[in-house]
Amino acid sequence: MNSSDEKTTQDAAARAPEPNGSEPAIHADLTTLEIHRGSHRGDKYVRIIRGNPHLLKRVAPGYLRATAEVSRPRGNIGRLYRGIKEFLVGKPLPSEAEKDERLNKIRALPVFSSDAISSSAYATEEILIVMVMAGAVGLAYSIPIALAIAFLLAVVSFSYRQTVHAYPHGGGSYTVSRENLGTQAGLVAAAALLIDYVLTVAVSISAGTAAITSAIQSLFPYRVEISVAFIVIITLINLRGVRESGTIFAVPTYLFVFSLAGVLVVGVARILLGEVATEEPRLEHKDLEPVTLFMILHAFAAGSVAMSGTEAIANGVPAFKPPESKNAATTLTWMSSILGVFFVGVTFLAYQYGIVPTETETIISQVGRAVLGTGVGYGIFQAATMLILVLAANTSFSGFPRLAYVLARDGFMPHQFTFRGDRLAFSNGIVILGAVAAALVIAFGGSTHALIPLYAVGVFLSFTLSQAGMVRHWWKSREPGWQKSMVINGTGACLTAVVLAVVGAVKFQLGAWVVLLLIPLLVLIFNGIQRHYQRVAEQLSLEHLGGKGIAPPRQIVIVPIGELNQASLRALAFARSISKDLVAVRVAFDADEASEFQQQWARWGNGNQLVILESPYRSFNEPLLVYIDALHRQDAEACITVVLPEFVPAHWWEHLLHNQTALRLKAALLFHRNTVTVDVPYHLVR
Amino acid sequence: MAFSRILVPVGGIPADEQAIRLACQVARQDKAKITAIHVIEVQRNLPLNAEDAAQMERGESVLARAEQIAKAARGSLETELLQARVAGSALVDEAGERGIDLIIMGIPDRKPLGDFYLGATTLYVLKNAACRVWLCREGRREDQPAARKEK
């Protein structure tokens, strides 16, 4: 039943006849059809010969898709590296899995909100530290100040809800400011946020480490190592992809949310049941200051620092499951509601329980202890607080790479930041953030108190620009209800501007001036990068060709030959196949060597031109480069192709036994104008 | 009786899995090579070599799935994609060309609307293949009634 006495082959990619009527010379999409005659008269069937479907899958004529197998390393070292990498960051995901990697609201909340929610652990303390200077009278202002900040948070959140719907491709403050206030305003917002993200990681990780070294003081000498280890762990978890990091970080975030909610419910219930008598705070200060407007503004500005991280969701809208904007807006509302309720709640309980800041215990710890006592519940609450403070850094790991991606997409940051890694996360942004934050921690010896004054200036600058941008947006769009939205955003812009001014004034001498220097510096760099990309694009643009293609240039081929062997003869044969203008060049160190080579050439040179370059000073590359330039001057339009014969030893270590002449010449030719370098390898088998 | 070359036609139906697993068992025992073949049937109003991208892609997926099943069953197989007017004759001809000595076909329990039915491809292979043919019928699901008894 042998059926294939007669068979014909066709290229599946080119079933249409060739323009000249001939069969295609190669099967470009690696698929050919063999027509076989069947066992019965007239029976035929087609065998579809697929090139290598395990590695390259053909999806359509002329369209191949690489499989996961392609990236699987073949060598032992490669396999070991791959194994370690897969253990640390997980197996690579195909691009089409991007939709599966997106976050639902439950997972998105811990990813994007850990920074904002963690603020409720220390924001009250920031207010009380200022107001306690005025004694009990000052502390009475803490609740109105907290309510004012909650109002500001509501305004900013409302603004970002509008942003999320108006700019569903992400970008947050940068996009809003750029589109409505101009490119430079957008870049200022972006620079401010990028600085803030780096500082958030360094400061929050150091704070988390400080909590650990306070509890276990023998670890204090290792605080830098511990902080760097935390940064490495968070970096690796983020490299595993946004969905997995969401799952990992969900547990501590929700533990904190539920435990603090429990503290608030129990604390308020005890007040309502009359179990708590409002206590007069025990104040250590003897010299009390009067309550002034500056003090209130200072406390307001200090407490407003809690709002950092609010913009992260607006940056990361594309990370949400569809409908992206709606889910992002809902998560934003959850986040700001939780933060607002927690912040006001903790401030209320602190006032009701007569709690004041001390140097030995945080306000949140005092509130927890006053409400829960010192049992297991308090222990869990404290552990959750420590974890959320460390995880505040994770919001930056979501925000920074996405903002860097948007900036890179617009040409203001290196294009490498648009790269998605094996797990579809913006790996370069994540690694750079981890590296810079670790460098800061090391530079400051694990004590980042000096960085805290730098913190928050950037956030409020971006808030102000973003809200001012939204005011302009409403003014331009005149959508239904624009007046109301514009008033809210305008109010928000004014309030955040006030906070910015106060924070700037209070913290200027403490180091905020560094940020005010860094922001314009970064903006200058962004503009420089964009100018470079514009120059590249202009020079490569097809528009200059006026609709015409590029005519094939004349090829002048140079084959530098060291000695005549199979490798050099194969390179000569290859060179001959691309041009008849072929010159073999031998760099000889003396006349005897030259003469000997000329004799060999007469036997093996196959009639090709040979030029001897005698180099009495024993340099190899330089005379050859000068010769190439001189030859090129004979025909400036021609393309000089240098064909390099090179034999490749069977084992990597055997490279050490050979001169790397070809390699050095390739390096020298890399930046040589109008020169193409072609390597003709000859693989040795043993 | 030892086999050296086994052919498993795969159509992307659940019954393929049992057939591949059985083939892997036999291949392990006899050190035989397995080839899984999927045939794209081309309508008569089209040229035999007409390309249907969707069918090609489906065929690739069916064969990729066959490889996965074999891998899970600690076996390996090579795959082949054919295009023919009638699947049965292409399978029989290809089996002859490859020197196949056993064809293992997975068949479903029955067609949804009635009596047990082997299908045209299975019948053709049973009637015309020179080598041995084993049929591997999938197990009956609980929600399916028993087949009508033969009169």
Image: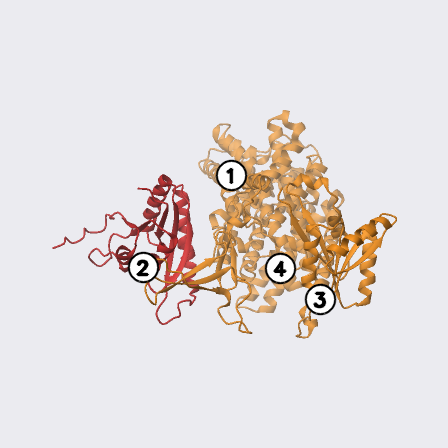
Chain colours: A orange, B red
Marks 1 and 4, Cα distance to the nearest angstrom?
A: 32 Å
Of the pair A135 and A323, the residue shown nearer to us: A323
Mark 1 neighbour class, 10 Å CA radius: few under 14, some 14 to 19, many 20 or more: many
Which residue is the site of mark 1?
A252
Residue A111 image offset from top left, x and y in percent? 53, 46
Chain letter, disc 4 residue: A
- Report the quarter where the N terminus of chain A lies: bottom left
Marks 4 and 2, Cα distance to the nearest angstrom?
A: 61 Å
> In terms of secondary structure, where does tag 3 sit?
helix
- Disc 4, disc 2: CB below 8 Å? no
- Looking at marks 1 and 3 on the same chain, the residue that comes earlier in the sequence is marked by 1
Which residue is the site of mark 4?
A175
The disc labelled 2 sits on which kind of residue? Gly
- Disc 1, disc 4: CB below 8 Å? no
Compared across the picture, whether A140 is left or right of A251 comes to right
Which residue is the site of mark 3?
A538
Chain letter, disc 1 residue: A
The disc labelled 1 sits on which kind of residue? Pro
Of the pair A498 and A75, the residue shown nearer to us: A75
Q: Same subunit under labels 4 and 3?
A: yes
Marks 3 and 2, Cα distance to the nearest angstrom?
A: 60 Å
- Report the quarter where the C terminus of chain A lies: top right
Q: Same subunit under labels 4 and 2?
A: no
Please say if A103 is above or below A632: above
Mark 4 neighbour class, 10 Å CA radius: few under 14, some 14 to 19, many 20 or more: many
The disc labelled 3 sits on which kind of residue? Glu
Residue A382 image offset from top left, x and y in percent? 54, 33
Of the pair A106 and A373, the residue shown nearer to us: A106
Marks 1 and 2, Cα distance to the nearest angstrom?
A: 61 Å
